[in-house]
Image (spheres, rainbow, N blue to C red):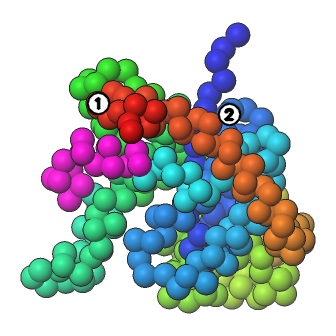
Amino acid sequence: MAAVTRVLSGVQPSGEMHLGNYLGAFRSWVAEQDQADAFYCVVDLHALTVPQDPEALRRRTLEAVACLLAVGLDPARCTLFLQSQVPEHPRLAWLLECQAAFGELRRMTQFKDKVGRHGGEGAEAGVSVGLFTYPVLMAADILLYQADRVPVGDDQRQHLELARDLAERFNHRFGPTFTVPEAAVPPVGARVMDLQEPTRKMSKSAASPQGTVLVVDPPEVLRRKVRRAVTDSDGEVRYDPARKPGVSNLLELLAASAGGDPTTLAGQFSSYGALKEAVADALVALLEPIRDRYATVLADPGELERVLAKGAAQAREVASATYDLAAERVGLLPPSSVG
């Protein structure tokens, strides 16, 4: 009998979750619960790399957990927890930081982009050390659970490569300690584009909120956003991402939410209006049950706390064993030998 694969994924509590989060990640997380030993965490420590209002962070963290439960994560079938409630995460991050090189962290694309946005000589002075080192914390997130596979998009591949490099380096220097994780490529069509700027990914930080469909959008709001989606002027419903990104995005959304192939679906519509109506209907049918469950879950904070306490306890069983092994490997004394 083959060993059960362990998979780990995380999401930041950065605000209300959008359609791209669900179609690109959460839906596959739900399926993964029955295919692997699945660990899912809300990475609230990563959120601290940029300034946060404490009350807002606490609220968004609970909202993120409620959303994950609403889309179908089941604490009886997976381990769902908060990163900050498992202290082995920052503890292992320190051990790994001591194995990481300054140069490889400085080459991280997201760090360079952030420095570039500050601009000018000495721009790094305005960037937090946490933003510089958080790829190592991300590596600790992964390696703590001896994850075999980690679902990643194109923007996270560099971070997974760092986790692999650190695992291999640590294992070479101190002996077998960490599983070297493999990337799990998201399914084709999981890339959800902005309705107003269909050449860029859907994001909560987009210039116009009208291009982002939130998982908890009421039906009338969702329909309005789809009706206002950017298309083009030739009027032909055709799947052609290069020449017709807006129309192609709508066809991909219809395929992802209701089933089918975008090219085949295109032949069913003679106008953009009819296509938008079908997309809106499909998205309402997909998201309305999630929105209803979300409201129910969020209304019971006691149950959310119980779910998180259970998840943290389960996560610590694995994380503490990994950390203790890594600490022993580098020469740290166990607590029982001190005093």
Q: Earlier in the sequence, mark 1 or mark 2?
A: 2
> Quadrant of the rendered structure where residue 227 is?
bottom right
Q: Position of residue 315 (x, y in %)?
A: 63, 43
| Badge 1: residue crowd in 10 Å (few <14, some 14–19, many ≥20) | few
Indicate whether residue 41 is drawn in magenta.
no
Q: Nearer the viewer, residue 312 or 6?
A: 312
Indicate whether residue 100 is drawn in magenta.
yes
**Residue at point 68% right, 33% down?**
37
Q: Nearer the viewer, residue 239 or 74?
A: 74
Label ID, residue 37 = 2
Q: Quadrant of the C terminus?
A: top left
Q: Amino acid at mark 2?
A: Asp
Label 1 secondary element: loop
Real-space Cα distance between discs 1 and 2?
Answer: 31 Å
**Residue at point 28% right, 48% down?**
97
| Residue that sits furthest to the top in the current view | 1
Closer to viewer: mark 1 or mark 2: 1
Q: Position of residue 321 (x, y in %)?
A: 52, 32
> Quadrant of the rendered structure where residue 272 is?
bottom right
Q: Which residue is mark 1?
A: 331
Q: Are marks 1 and 2 in contact (CB under 8 Å)?
A: no
Image-based side of 250 in relation to 302, left or right: left
> Quadrant of the rendered structure where residue 55 is?
bottom right
Q: Write the start and end of the magenta stretch as one range.
A: 91-107
| Badge 2: residue crowd in 10 Å (few <14, some 14–19, many ≥20) | some
Q: Amino acid at mark 1?
A: Gly
| Residue that sits furthest to the left in the current view | 121
**Residue at point 49% right, 47% down?**
88
Q: Position of residue 101 (x, y in %)?
A: 18, 47
